[in-house]
Image (cartoon, rainbow, N blue to C red):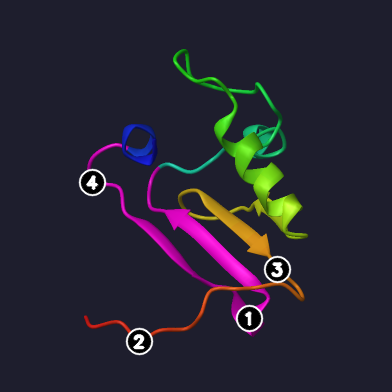
């Protein structure tokens, strides 16, 4: 559950990668330390007592089923980039804001 994971006051943003090669999901929380980033998608890996370690592993499995790649990248907050080269991406839309 994203709400339970990121907490109150955290904003989650989804948008296209440059060049329409995929999309990103990011938040403005504390981020993911480099030593955790390398294992974040490992099935059963968690840094939380109440975590199962299945959430990001499932996300990776779904991405790979579509022929996509996903990685946690160095950024302020957590940022995941999904490369969809040749596959479907997010359509560009104009915000009403």
Q: Is residue 92 above or below residue 69?
A: below
For disc 3, the marked residue is 84
**Label 4 residue SS:** loop
Q: Earlier in the sequence, mark 2 or mark 3?
A: 3
Q: Earlier in the sequence, mark 4 or mark 3?
A: 4
Single out the mark in the foreground, 4 or 1. 1
Q: Earlier in the sequence, mark 1 or mark 3?
A: 1
Single out the mark in the foreground, 4 or 3. 3
x and y, in percent, of residue 17 in the image: 59, 74
For disc 1, the marked residue is 20
Q: Is residue 16 above or below residue 54?
A: below
Label 2 vs label 3: CA separation? 21 Å
For disc 4, the marked residue is 9
Label 1 vs label 3: CA separation? 9 Å
> In the depicted view, which residue is nearer to us: 14 or 39?
14
Highlighted range, magenta: 7-29
* 10 Å crowding of disc 3: few (<14), some (14-19), many (20+): many
Q: Is residue 84 above or below residue 27?
A: below
For disc 2, the marked residue is 94
Label 1 vs label 2: CA separation? 15 Å
Instruction: Verify whether residue 50 appears in magenta.
Output: no
**Label 2 residue SS:** loop
- Image check: 56 left or right of 42? left
Question: Marks 2 and 4: in contact by CB < 8 Å?
Answer: no
């Amino acid at each position: 559950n994203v709400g339970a994971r990121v907490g109150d006051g955290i904003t989650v943003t989804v948008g296209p990668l440059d060049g329409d090669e995929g999309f990103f999901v990011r938040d403005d929380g504390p981020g993911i330390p480099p030593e955790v980033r390398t294992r974040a998608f490992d099935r059963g890996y968690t840094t939380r007592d109440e975590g199962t370690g299945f959430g990001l592993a499932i996300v990776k499995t779904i991405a790979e089923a579509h022929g996509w790649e996903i990685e946690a990248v160095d950024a302020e907050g957590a940022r995941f980039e999904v490369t969809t080269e040749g596959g479907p991406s997010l359509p560009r839309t104009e915000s009403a804001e």
